[in-house]
Amino acid sequence: MRLWRRFLGLPPKYEQKPVENLTISVVVPAYNEERTIASTILSLKKQTRKINKIIVVDDCSNDRTGEIARGLGVTVLRPSKNQGTKAQAQNYALPYIDTDLMVTVDADTLLDSNAIERTLAYFSDPDMASVCGFVVPQKITTIWEKGRFIEYLFGLFIFKGAQRNLGVPLVCSGCFSVFRTDKMKKIGGFQPRTMAEDMDLTWEFLSRGEKVEFVSNAFCYPLDPPTFPIFIAQINRWYRSFFQNISIHKKDIFRNKKLAFFIYWYLLDGLLLPLILFFGLYYLTKGNISWALIWLLGLEFLFVAVPVLFQGWKINKFWLTLKSLPAYFIIRPVNIFVYYKSFFQEWVLKQKLTAWEKGH
């Protein structure tokens, strides 16, 4: 029934229920974030729903991150040594949280003033473990930021929309997600076993039968990679973490057949679809590589442009979306190359990525 409501454009019933009087803590893991931490904290203080506690985990920064956070009146926790990953930094704050909900926000991310409030009605469902929002780059200036903007619009509108319709959003993004605290503590918090703790935790929840939701009107604005080297480092971490998580969850994800379907669909889509499309068009154009590439680009442009421009119009960024579209087709071959490289490093050479790369 829930699925039919979604296809008809109707919200699930629990979205219409009154919001409980839920208490809220926000955890902000931070390492050398003196340039952005104040803006992030101020965006939290402007939320339309009362936040009971804001905790900044100053993970042994060697700049003024902790000093700035304390000056803004929030709780600052500083471990005796650097925790190594964002997952472990967030876990450091877990014993200090006694509220109903725990929100995680990156130290370079801004939230719409109503972002947290728009997630709360979903927690009227006692089985709801986590809710995530819609991601839009904070800055959309360089080719890499523009390309990422289009990726977000396309991926969240098409792919995450499909996942949501079937009740299995694959990732509650680490830059902004809301968790039921007791479920988070029961599961043991974030695990440091991969370089994508958000994906790992989401799959763990879904494979255990817990519910996860994606809210398309709860907006957050992270800083995305502005340059080619930082862009490469970030997507390398994302893709290699995807393969790491499949290796870890390869058995338990089949407890949730819909989750397993999407994971292995995206695995095969990334590995095989570019080759199938290219060689199929190469055959149809009788061995003409130039025409095969033109057809490939043309088909992808139509497939991407229509839903992306519609989504851009919905969020009042139509012209920015139109101007950013060419950047997507610049970063697209880069993504494909890094995806194959990540597959080879993680699963063929068995060279597990263990170093965390920031996205800015």
Image (tube, rainbow, N blue to C red):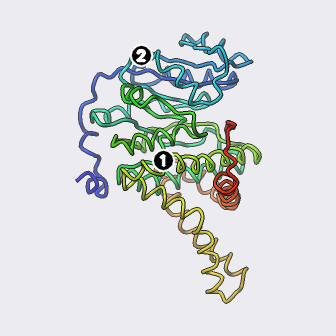
Q: Which mark, residue 97? A: none
**Nearer to me, 322 or 91:** 91
**Is residue 223 among what the camera can see?**
yes
Q: Which residue is mark 1?
A: 249
Q: Nearer the viewer, mark 1 or mark 2?
A: 1
Question: Which three-letter amino acid code belongs to the residue tagged 1?
Answer: His
Q: Residue sitting at 46 percent across and 50 percent down?
A: 314
> Residue 192, percent across and down?
57, 33
Q: Which residue is mark 2?
A: 52
**Is residue 330 among what the camera can see?**
no
Question: Which three-letter amino acid code belongs to the residue tagged 2?
Answer: Asn
The number of numbered badges drawn on the structure is 2
Looking at the image, residue 99 lies above or below residue 282: above
- Report helix, strand or loop for mark 1: helix
> Residue 243, percent across and down?
58, 51
Which of marks 2 and 1 precedes in the sequence? Answer: 2
Q: Is residue 34 left or right of residue 315?
A: right
Q: Residue sitting at 50 percent across and 31 percent down?
A: 190
**Nearer to me, 258 or 255:** 255
Residue extending furthest bottom? 286
Q: What is the distance, in whole Å, between disc 1 and disc 2 at their CAs? A: 35 Å
- Report helix, strand or loop for mark 2: loop
> Residue 50, percent across and down?
40, 19
Res 92 quadrant in image: top right
Res 141 quadrant in image: top right
